[in-house]
Image (cartoon, rainbow, N blue to C red):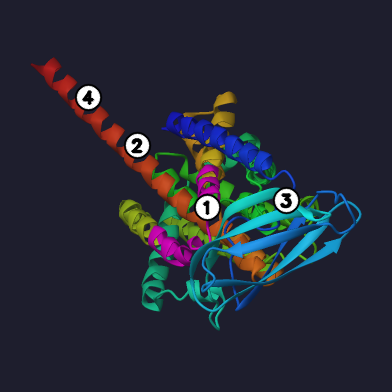
């Protein structure tokens, strides 16, 4: 199962390095502040192209910009601003309808009466999405309220059932030997944010989008972690403990990482950490699970019933969760390019690979290895979304919000694929074992 994830990681990493180097070699003088896909939120938009080309004569270079579809996107003007080391060209664009087109950007130098083309960037893809009165985030979360009303009691019942499966002896063991929790915390709050930053730089993502991936990578484990730990035969008690511990640590590590990486990326402003959301997430896990623990001690027969229904409830919640994530994220995918999608695939795969590898090196039991991998790979991306929406103004917030939604959707798909492969292999093993027993009996 995890061999497949490691092979996927190697292939994607090589692809990223190749793509990043190709981009760097292509942009020798010109550098576009945003990615190839530009997100428009109003009728007018301004983009900046910087140039490190030194003019042969005073003010001899200029930028020529042409739209492939002038009816969709018009170039109003291009202004030039000097600085000691770099020249910035500001391009004013106007649009009045949705659609896609391409820009051609040329840097020219007029030497006397002759004009010389210095550099040309063709097919800069532009995707125009007109903003409505609601923000993109508000438009994306208009989910059927009836679904939420129906699913909330099921979530609480499922968490209560998980409480019935908790073994208090495991808590005591982890308290004495906290290595699994430490491995998970190091992976989640140190290694993953650095990898998110590094890969976003290799792909030359815009600063806001790079910050979105870093914040997603520094999120604590999500509630789906102990759900998949159950379905993949991991250590459920350890999964719940790791989720609670990482959520508590997030109160310190998320603001720390946001400060460090915002400075590295050159982002200014105040970054708001949703403390209330972190605390409510922690309570939302702890309260129903504590109720389940009490039920197990006081009413064992009810606990037995809850343990029987935990797997079907978990499968239902997993399906609904993936559906709702896709429904909320489809609008953001309109402004996602291939690099963002591949990075979204790689982030959960990296978490799974690092968590499992570290646990294996430490020679921990297989269920514990699975649990550490799952807790490292499944992140509470919606905490990152809250930070981004509270900290950035539009349209930068919407550009950065692509990261948590992309990671959430990709992690759900990857975990579902791993689960299907695991169950298929387990079923095949049971069939082979059954045939072997029949042969022995004959």
Question: At which x and y percent is residue 59?
Answer: 86, 59
Question: At which x and y percent is residue 128?
Answer: 53, 69
Instruction: Give the CA separation, mark 4 to mark 1.
Output: 38 Å
Q: Earlier in the sequence, mark 1 or mark 3?
A: 3
Q: Which residue is mark 3?
A: 30
Q: Earlier in the sequence, mark 2 or mark 1?
A: 1
Instruction: Give the CA separation, mark 2 to mark 1.
Output: 22 Å
Compared to residue 333, the image places residue 185 above or below, namely above
Question: Could you tell me if the residues under marks 3 and 4 are in contact, i.e. CB atoms within 8 Å?
Answer: no
Q: Secondary structure at mark 4?
A: helix
Question: At which x and y percent is residue 404?
Answer: 56, 57
Q: Which residue is mark 4?
A: 433
Q: Which residue is mark 1?
A: 407
Which residues, given as a range, are shown in magenta? 321-346
Instruction: Give the CA separation, mark 3 to mark 4.
Output: 64 Å
Viewer-side residue, 363 vs 68 = 68
Q: Secondary structure at mark 1?
A: helix
Q: Nearer the viewer, mark 3 or mark 2?
A: 3
Question: Could you tell me if the residues under marks 4 and 1 are in contact, i.e. CB atoms within 8 Å?
Answer: no
Q: Can you see residue 301?
A: no
Question: Which circle marks residue 422 in the picture?
Answer: 2
Q: Earlier in the sequence, mark 3 or mark 2?
A: 3
């Amino acid at each position: 199962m995890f061999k497949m994830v490691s092979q996927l990681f190697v292939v994607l990493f090589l692809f990223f390095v190749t793509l990043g180097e190709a981009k760097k070699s292509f942009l020798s003088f010109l550098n576009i502040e945003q990615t190839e896909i530009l997100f428009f939120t109003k009728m007018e938009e301004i983009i900046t192209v910087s140039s490190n080309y030194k003019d042969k004569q005073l003010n001899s270079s200029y930028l020529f910009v042409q739209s492939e579809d002038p009816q969709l996107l018009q170039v109003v003007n291009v202004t030039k601003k000097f600085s000691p080391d770099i020249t910035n060209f500001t391009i004013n664009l106007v649009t009045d309808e949705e659609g896609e087109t391409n820009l051609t950007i040329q840097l020219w130098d007029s030497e006397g009466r002759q004009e010389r083309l210095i550099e040309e960037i063709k097919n800069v893809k532009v995707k125009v999405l007109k903003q409505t009165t609601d923000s993109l985030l508000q438009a994306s979360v208009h989910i059927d309220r009836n679904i939420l009303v129906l699913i909330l009691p099921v979530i609480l019942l499922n968490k209560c059932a998980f409480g019935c499966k908790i073994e208090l002896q495991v808590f005591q063991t982890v308290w004495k030997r906290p290595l699994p929790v430490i491995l998970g915390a190091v992976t989640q709050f140190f290694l993953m944010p650095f990898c998110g930053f590094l890969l976003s730089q290799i792909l030359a993502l815009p600063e806001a989008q790079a910050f979105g991936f870093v914040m997603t990578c520094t999120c604590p484990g999500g509630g789906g972690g102990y759900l998949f730990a159950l379905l993949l035969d991991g250590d459920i008690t350890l999964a719940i403990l790791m989720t609670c511990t990482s959520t508590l640590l997030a109160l310190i590590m998320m603001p720390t990482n946001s400060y460090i990486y915002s400075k590295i990326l050159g982002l200014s402003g105040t970054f708001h950490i949703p403390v209330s959301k972190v605390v409510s997430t922690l309570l939302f896990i702890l309260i129903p699970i504590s109720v389940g623990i009490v039920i197990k001690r006081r009413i064992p027969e009810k606990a037995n019933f809850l343990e029987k229904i935990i797997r079907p409830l978990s499968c239902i919640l997993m399906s609904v969760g993936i559906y709702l994530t896709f429904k909320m994220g489809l609008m953001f995918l309109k402004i996602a390019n291939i690099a963002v999608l591949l990075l979204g695939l790689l982030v959960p795969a990296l978490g799974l690979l690092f968590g499992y590898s570290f646990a294996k090196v430490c020679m921990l039991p297989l269920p514990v290895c699975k649990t550490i991998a799952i807790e490292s790979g499944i992140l509470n991306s919606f905490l990152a979304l809250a930070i981004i929406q509270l900290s950035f103004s539009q349209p930068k917030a919407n550009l950065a919000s692509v990261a948590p939604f992309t990671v959430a959707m990709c992690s759900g798909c990857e975990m579902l694929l791993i689960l299907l492969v695991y169950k298929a292999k387990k079923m095949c093993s049971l069939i082979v074992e059954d045939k072997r027993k029949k042969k022995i009996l004959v």
